[in-house]
Structure formats: C-alpha cells, structure tokens
C-alpha cells in the first residue's frame, strides 16, 4: 500500500509527493482546516481507472473505520472502475456526533463547517492520482453516521460536487422542516425553502436494511425527538423518505429520491454495499 502526503499549493512538497498514486490501495493525508491539521484519506485506484474516470466517496460510520470501509468497497471499485475515496473523520479531530454526523454546523460559521472536508478530501485525492483537483464531480455513499453526514450535506451545503447520493441505515434524520430545531429539523440553520427545493430534486436513494430493527444498539439515538421518527433505523428511514416526498409535493418540486430495501441485512456496511453500488451506477 502506498502512502502519500499532499501539501498545500503554497508549500514546496518533496519530489516523492508529486508522483501520482498508482493502482491498488493507498493512504494519503492532506491539510484540512476543520481537522486542525492533517486528515487521512484511504483510497483504492483500480488498474483500469484513468484521470477523468468516475469517483465514489464513501463515508464511514461512528466507528470511524475508514480503512475498513475502503477494504470492503475496493472489490466494487475494481469491478466498476471507479476511484474510491474514503476520508477518515477521526474521533481526535472530530469528537462526538456533533463534530462528525452533524457536520459541526450548529453554532459555527458556515466556512468552518466540517462538511467542507468532504469535497476537499475528494479534490486532494484527485490531485494525488494525477488529476486537476478542481475537475469533475463524484458519487456519495454514507453509511450509519456517514449517512447522517451525507443527507445533512445535501440540505446545508447543496451537496456540493455530488452527482448521486445513497443514504444508508442512518440512526436518525434531519427532517425537511425549517420549523423544527436542528439536528432533527433545519430551524437555526442557513437552510430555507430554496435549499429544501434543491435538495429534494437531487438524485438520492434512502437505502435501508430490512433487518436493521434492533432497539438496543448503543449508537441508536433514543431521545424523544429521535423516537418520534420511529423505533429503529428501518422504520426511521421509511418515515424520513415519506416526509421528504410530502415536502416535495407541498413545495411543488420534482422529487428526485428513491427508497430501496436490502432483504436479510441489518446494520452492516458490507451487506449494504452491493446494492448501494447498483443504486449509484445503474
């Protein structure tokens, strides 16, 4: 596995850092303001991939196991020929759910949100494999806490740089409701009806494991606000999709979302990944 460190443009990098990452797995770092230093990114570059090819960003769950997500998704990257980019939102740099799942948006200026680490990580990865970091768009898959991050990125950041999105097995959701307090709704954020209209029209899939119904998982939020969304992840995802569909009808905008189920699968990234790949590319 190759390791690279990506330096900011204003810094003179060693010659080794200028060489593009070759085929296979790799780890790189880049300087990310919201992390307070270097942020790791785990990559897989298929042998068939060339600059200009498809890119998929995969966001890990609350366990912060970006490398494990990279390893799970690497065979699909090879099969489909996409560059796989897995940023690592470590506990040290992004402590707790507010700093990662919520995008650290509440009470912080927009330019300081950790949401922006996502497009910057993808841009850094593109540069590391020999592309112009500003070129091209990418697909996005978020699982569990990464799914929370992803759908809030859609509401609050216009899903910057993203073509298609899959939100898989989130523990709870930010409702398309500008009167309900964040993170359960969008009140107190910069998102208004215009942002809702754009977010509801984008191509997105709410992907749910049919067996993700355990009520006692330690990471399943059980506040009164979360319990109003449903007793478990499977139920909450269906309620969220229904609320989004109703919001699109109320706002008279084309609804770009779909919902899909994965039979026999619970709270498992590995179990969700094959169907997620289909949703992103088929």
Image: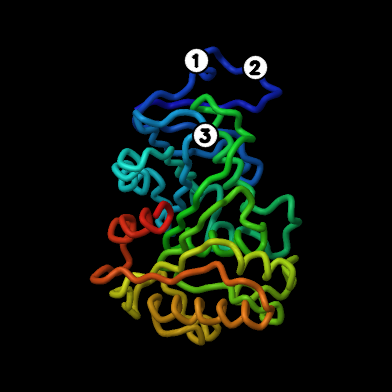
Q: Residues within 10 Å of mark 3 (few under 14, many from 20)?
A: many
Image quadrant holding the N terminus, namely top left
Instruction: Examine the image and state in which quarter residue 180 appears.
Output: bottom right
Q: Position of residue 259 (x, y in %)?
A: 43, 71
Q: CA distance from mark 2 to mark 3?
A: 18 Å
- Looking at the picture, does residue 278 appear above or below residue 230? above
Residue found 64% across the figure and 46% down from its top? 34
Residue at numbered disc 1: 16
Q: Position of residue 133 (x, y in %)?
A: 60, 32
Q: CA distance from mark 3 to mark 1?
A: 15 Å
**Closest to the observer: 141 or 232?**
141
Residue at numbered disc 3: 125
Residue found 46% across the figure and 41% down from its top? 85
- Circles 2 and 1: CB distance less than 8 Å? no
Instruction: Examine the image and state in which quarter residue 9 appears.
Output: top right
Mark 3 vs mark 1: in front: 3
Residue found 58% across the figure and 58% down from its top? 99
Q: Residues within 10 Å of mark 2 (few under 14, many from 20)?
A: few
Q: Position of residue 11 (x, y in %)?
A: 67, 21
Residue found 63% across the figure and 59% down from its top? 104
The numbered mark, 2 or 3, whose residue comes first in the sequence reads 2
Residue at numbered disc 2: 12
Q: Position of residue 244 (x, y in %)?
A: 57, 77
């Amino acid at each position: 596995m190759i390791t690279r460190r990506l330096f900011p443009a204003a810094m003179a990098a060693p010659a080794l850092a200028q060489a593009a990452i070759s085929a296979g797995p790799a780890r790189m770092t880049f300087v990310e303001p919201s992390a307070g230093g270097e942020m790791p990114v785990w990559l897989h570059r298929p042998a068939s991939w060339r600059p200009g090819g498809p890119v998929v960003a995969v966001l890990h769950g609350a366990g912060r196991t970006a490398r494990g997500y990279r390893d799970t998704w690497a065979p699909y990257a090879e099969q489909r020929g996409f560059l796989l980019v897995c940023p690592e939102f470590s506990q040290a740099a992004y402590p707790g759910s507010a700093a990662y799942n919520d995008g650290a948006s509440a009470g912080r200026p927009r330019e300081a949100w950790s949401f922006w680490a996502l497009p910057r990580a993808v841009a850094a990865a593109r540069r590391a494999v020999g592309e112009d970091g500003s070129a091209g768009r990418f697909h996005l898959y978020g699982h569990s806490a990464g799914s929370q991050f992803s759908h809030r990125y859609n509401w609050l950041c216009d899903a910057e740089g993203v073509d298609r999105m899959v939100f898989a097995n989130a523990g709870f959701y930010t409702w398309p409701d500008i009167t309900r307090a964040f993170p359960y709704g969008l009140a107190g954020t910069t998102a208004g009806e215009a942002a809702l209209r754009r977010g509801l029209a984008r191509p997105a899939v709410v992907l749910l494991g049919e067996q993700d119904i355990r009520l006692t998982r330690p990471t399943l939020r059980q506040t009164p606000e979360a319990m109003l969304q449903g007793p478990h992840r499977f139920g909450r995802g269906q309620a969220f999709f229904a609320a989004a569909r109703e919001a699109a009808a109320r706002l008279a905008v084309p609804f770009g979302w779909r919902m899909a189920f994965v039979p026999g699968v619970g709270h498992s990234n590995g179990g969700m990944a094959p169907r997620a790949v289909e949703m992103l590319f088929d």
